[in-house]
Structures are given as C-alpha cells and as structure tokens.
Amino acid sequence: MRPPGFTGGTLDRADHLRQDPAALAGVRADARARLLRLDAAEPEVNEDGRLVWAPLSEAPDRAELMLLGLDGEARPHFAARLPDDPPAAGRSPALIAMLDAMRAEDAAHYAAARSLIDWHARHGFCANCGARTSPHRAGWARHCDGCGAEHFPRVDPVVIMIAEHDGRALLGRQPAWPQGRYSALAGFLEVGEAIEEAVAREIAEEAGVPVRGVRYVASQPWPFPSSLMIACIAEATDDTITVDENELESARWFTREDVRAALAGNPAAPFLPPPPYAIAHTLMHAWADG
C-alpha cells in the first residue's frame, strides 16, 4: 500500500528541548538553524520542487518561532509567524500543484508547520478566562497570561471510508469538486463515538447505506487546518443509495476495474480520482488491490 500523503517526515521533534529554556535558547542560537520560507502560509519551493530553508536569522524580531525538529545532523528547523498574521486561507491552485509534486518528507514537514501556524493564529486568547496567550514550549503550546492555563494544538479526528458491496465501492462527490471527481465519504467523529460507529453513521447519513464489519486501513495528518484522517473500509448490507443532498451531489457504486482505471489516469475511466496526497487516493488503492 502506498504511504498516505503528509507522512514520512524525517525530523526528530525533540520534545526534550521544548521544556528546557536553556537548551531551547541554545538551539535558537545555533548558526546552522534553518527557517522554513513561507508566503502567507504557503511554502516556497526551489526549481526541484523542494522546500526552501533560510537561515533562522532571517526571521523578523517579532516572529513567534516554532521548533519543527532536528535533522540527522542535529540542525534545528523552525517555522515562524508574526503575532498579527491571520489564519491560513484554503488551498490555492499553486499550493495544490506544489503538493502534487512534493516529496513525502517535505510535505510532512510543511503539514506540521502549517497546522501549527494556523493553530497559533486562532488561539490568541484563553478559552478559560479570555486573557491573551503567548507561545510556549517551543511553539507547541500557548500559555495564558491571565489564569496560567496551558493550551495545546488540537487535532480533529475525521473518518474517511469506502463501503463495499458485491465487489463494488461506494464513492460520492461534492458540488465544489472538479468536474467528474468522486472520492471516499468522510465526516468528523462526534463526542462519545467510536471510529467504527462514526463510519457507520456517516455512510448512513450521507448515502443511506447500512454497513457492518468496519476495518481500519491507515491514517493521515491533514493540515487544512488540522485533522487526522482515519481511513476505513466497511461492508454494506444493502446497496440502495439515498443521497443527502445537503452533503453530497451524488453517490455511486464503482467496480474495481472502474477504480483501477481512475487511479491509473485512464481517460476512459468513469470518474476523476482524488489527488495522490489525499488519503482517499491511498484508500482507493488499498481497496482496488484487495
């Protein structure tokens, strides 16, 4: 099975440095320290499509620094944001093109940086008392200047799944997607819900199809803004589709031959698949390969 996108990072996240102010000061003073070059939360890439890293000294004086980790030579790698930077926008066409071509480790490092930057932009005030917060633990937390509470980056779990029935996969499409694209169904886990329960609920809500026998396939960080995609396959007990038009434009059953043709880029395929960096692409491969 092909690895999901945004996985395969090579940096040691160096948690031991995050809680040691003296060690962290030494890391920031390291002449080899590198800074990820970003433009409005989108990465700069060189002619080979690789991430561009600059000397940390290029960071503005007011910048909030986030330690992404250490490489194999113990060189520190950072991302930075200014305190008044707004939350990141969606995926631009330029970013989509970059992600399609980006190496796995670069995509993983960018995903971590983007999620952190966006979280900091959205959590300038304490959810407990409303006072301002400031970066803490090398950028992996925020500390409330009023009540002293610590806040940590959140990750929102999302199930993404294929229901199978009689050798066919249930896929759906949203109206905002490119023409002809179909993908796995997906939805956020709700409070007090297991992964298996969320898979069954989401498929029933969006397509009206009852399922059982949910099995886990893989997971993926998704930095738009910060989700954990949990990919599963479930067995449908009935193939009658009733689409929730508030969620989907349509849903259809596709054979393995249909899915294989789409993944292979066959112009005659009956649908356009999701991009390779999306775990839905990985999930379709896993299902098509049996």
Image (spheres, helix red, strand yellow):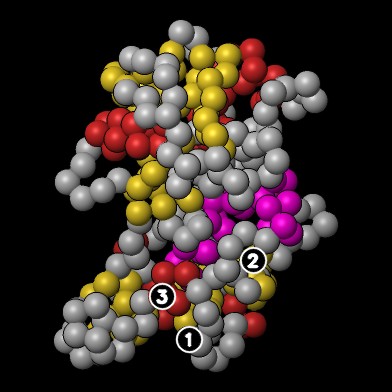
- Disc 3 vs disc 1: which is toward the camera? 3
Specify the label residue 122 is tagged with: 3
Viewer-closest of 53 and 152? 152
Mark closest to the chain's N terminus, 3 or 2: 2
Query: Image height check: is 111 above or below 245?
Result: below
- Pointer 2 residue: 42
Q: Are marks 2 and 1 in contact (CB under 8 Å)?
A: no
Specify the segment rendered in magenta. Answer: 93-117
* Residue at 35% across, 47% down: 188
In the image, residue 217 lies in the stretch drawn in magenta:
no
Viewer-closest of 91 and 173? 173
Q: Amino acid at mark 1?
A: Pro
Specify the label residue 83 is tagged with: 1
Judged by its main secondary structure, the magenta piece is helix
Q: Secondary structure beneath disc 1?
A: loop
Q: Amino acid at mark 3?
A: Arg
Query: Image height check: is 108 above or below 130?
Result: above
* Residue at 62% across, 21% down: 259
